[in-house]
Image (cartoon, coloured by chain):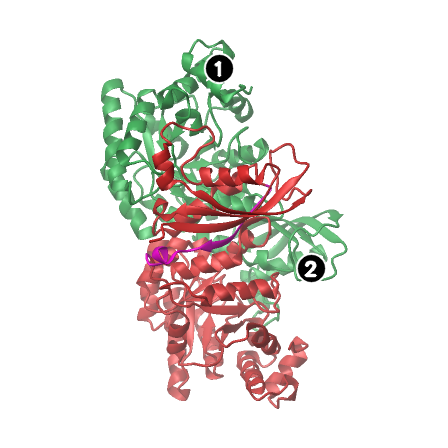
Chain colours: A green, B red
Amino acid sequence: MSKYLNVKYYIETPESIKKTADLIAKMQSTGTWAGVKQETKKLVKKFGAKVKDIRILKQTKKIHLPTRAKNKNKINCAEIIISYPWENFGKNIAMLISTVAGEIYDLSELTAIKVIDILFPYDYLKLFKGPKFGLSGSRDTVKAYNRPLFGAITKPCVGLSAKEIAKLAYEVSFAGIDFIKDDELLADASYNSITDRTREVSKALKSVYEKTGKITMYAFNITDNPDKVLKLHDIAVKNGARAIMFNVLTGGFNTLNMLAEHTKVPIHCHRDFAVSTFRSPYIGITSYVFTKLTRLAGGDQIQCGGISGYLYEEDDEVLKSFDACLENFGNIKQSLPVSSGGMWAGKLPVNLRKIKHNDFLFLSGGGVFGHPAGGFGGVKSILSAYEAIKNGKKLEESNCPYLKKAIQKFGKVEY
Amino acid sequence: MSKYLNVKYYIETPESIKKTADLIAKMQSTGTWAGVKQETKKLVKKFGAKVKDIRILKQTKKIHLPTRAKNKNKINCAEIIISYPWENFGKNIAMLISTVAGEIYDLSELTAIKVIDILFPYDYLKLFKGPKFGLSGSRDTVKAYNRPLFGAITKPCVGLSAKEIAKLAYEVSFAGIDFIKDDELLADASYNSITDRTREVSKALKSVYEKTGKITMYAFNITDNPDKVLKLHDIAVKNGARAIMFNVLTGGFNTLNMLAEHTKVPIHCHRDFAVSTFRSPYIGITSYVFTKLTRLAGGDQIQCGGISGYLYEEDDEVLKSFDACLENFGNIKQSLPVSSGGMWAGKLPVNLRKIKHNDFLFLSGGGVFGHPAGGFGGVKSILSAYEAIKNGKKLEESNCPYLKKAIQKFGKVEY
């Protein structure tokens, strides 16, 4: 049985790499700056983190983070791997993060410290149940297979009443969308409560189903205090919700984990604030690590940024997060990766080309509801784009008037 | 009644500042990149965020964050203030953060985006109860007034049994310490559970009280899944705990908020992972903003970095976080600010000189338990240092053998 979890860091330091790697291992397990007599060899052997690997990279002269440290002429750079005994934190994602990505950020010896990867042994993964539904459960909910799922985000993000949202949901479900979600800015609002919204939207979606047979899942954002999260989940499910949504880092990883063990429907996960810890190459964790942790906590559908979208990330980084959703992860189910942020019909070809498979949710907000013919037209433009691609045609060759209008408004198709 | 919450940002962008400020206000409230017809004037008037102020700063040529944006020759810099209608998120710290510090970090138009301050109107603060005990309640618990509180962190951070921790607690309580806490790396561990630790430590502290009359509070780290957090709190309090501890960002702001409304004892708050969003000047939030949010959520005692310590922050930044604990905050009680990270007796003079008042917790880990005479000697060295300062003496003039030994081991006193 593997008792260690390996964490890969990128570090920069004016000190020696060896000394700094040792410091991290020490400070994040049994050590302290002063040394105490209770830190016996026996205790360190069992509970101490260890430097497992060091790969020296070339030096830099740049100081990438503010620091009290003096003597900063040459900065050493390296990738290092530290092994942590996972008994130190157990089945507790908050404590796992506090351990491997905690006070390290505070150390003045470091002028860059980025968690690049966490390698989980299967024995550790076994402590968790992961997503209850994941990729396959999300497909089963809407009975859509062998193609990407298509989704819409209700817009405007905030300010609509429950009935107005239900009207939008009706429109896009009727047009054939698989998935709809709240914007991450809307949760249980005073002017549009989860109780009202789940009731109105479910009624609208039921009516579409009765007319057309189309099943659409709507993910209601229930990010809130944890005791309320469980209540909102129960209200949503009772009112017919087929999915819920959660803002992971602001809402809390452990609340997600609790919710995942409780939920009766898939959980759609948003990253928002977490990007403040991804984006700098010199501090924080990567989106890849965040996505892994979200999957571990039980996120069924995970936002990964957007292929060729308006968000900052290069496509390769987005694809790494896709990997985190889909790669082998012991007993843990695959999550459904989501491409979002500036998506519209004309971005579908480049998404399919770069992603190279069908197992993702293509999610549009403005690209659906900003369509000149409204949400109905937006959905039709995307479905027609997919039809064209399946038939080996250019989107510009399609006869669909909604797709033509989308191209007119949103610009060039990306292949 | 003020319906707006004002947020101050530092931004850098290759675009015009005016356009970028408008984009932030739009994207974080009613807008989308594509424009939708439901975004009516009436809706924007009520729910839209507004640019309230712009202060242009000098341009830079440096690109401080990775971005897809092209055209990056000149980068415009500014401080801007955006006003958000707080009805959009209500009494929900997660949703507040997702709104004011959410998808902004994703925008490729920005090459720096830092939340510098959140200005809360009193009407918004009234939704929250804040710390139940705070500064004054923490003092009352240990009956210590008109002087700093002195605290110790049990070391080694991990690996000790409940009985071993109780032994350390006995030692430092007997020496006269006010406060003890778990390291942030230790919570409800399989080898040292909260049940065992609270029982053993409380027994030890009771025995000191019976012998000496000294009351010491020990903050037990109960960071865990939220349903378990409440149970661990109840176990701890039943076993005699006088404080608990919580890792704020990894454990979740809303879990802290729930816990604060439930707790029967003060909550000591650790920041660990949150530093990954403070440290770069170009992304994230400041420690000042984090401390304000922690106080709002109900943190009674808040770690603020250390004056002249080993952490990266300059003292001015630490003092800003102290302000966040103590400044006027409507109906919300003062929190107890904590100076920690490399503290020992010889750092007390510089702490008192820079902090300029007594309302803080001077917290040492290695500086207590790394003392040549162990925890007892460490505490005595700190208390003697305070005696010397009170009597207008240099620490080097003190006759206390423990203080002499501390200076021998830890180095120069800082005044």
Q: Quadrant of residue B190?
A: bottom left
- Sequence order check: which comes first, mark 2 or mark 1? 2
Q: Is residue A358 visible?
A: yes
Q: Is residue A175 above or below residue A282?
A: above
Using the rendered image, report if marks 2 and 1 lie on a common chain. Answer: yes
Which of the 4 quarters of the picture holds residue B308?
bottom right
Q: Which residue is mark 2?
A: A19
- Is residue A237 in sight in this rendering? no
Q: Mark 1 = which residue?
A: A389
Check disc 1 and give the amino acid type: Ile
Residue numbers of the magenta segment: B111-127
Q: Position of residue A57 (x, y in %)?
A: 72, 46
Left or right: B180, with B260 as reference point: right
Is residue A223 located in the magenta-colored stretch of the structure? no
Chain of residue at mark 1: A
Seen from the viewer's position, the closer of residues B19 and A85 is B19
Q: Is residue B118 magenta?
A: yes
- Please name the residue shown 54% across and 19% down the image: A412
Q: Residue at x 49, y 40 (%)?
A: B24
Residue B176 location, x and y as percent? 47, 83
* Distance CA(mark 2)–CA(mark 1): 55 Å
Q: Secondary structure at mark 2?
A: helix
- Answer few, some or many: residues within 10 Å of disc 1's Cα (few below 14, many 20 plus, some between 14 and 19): some
- Residue B265 x, y percent position in the rendering: 35, 69
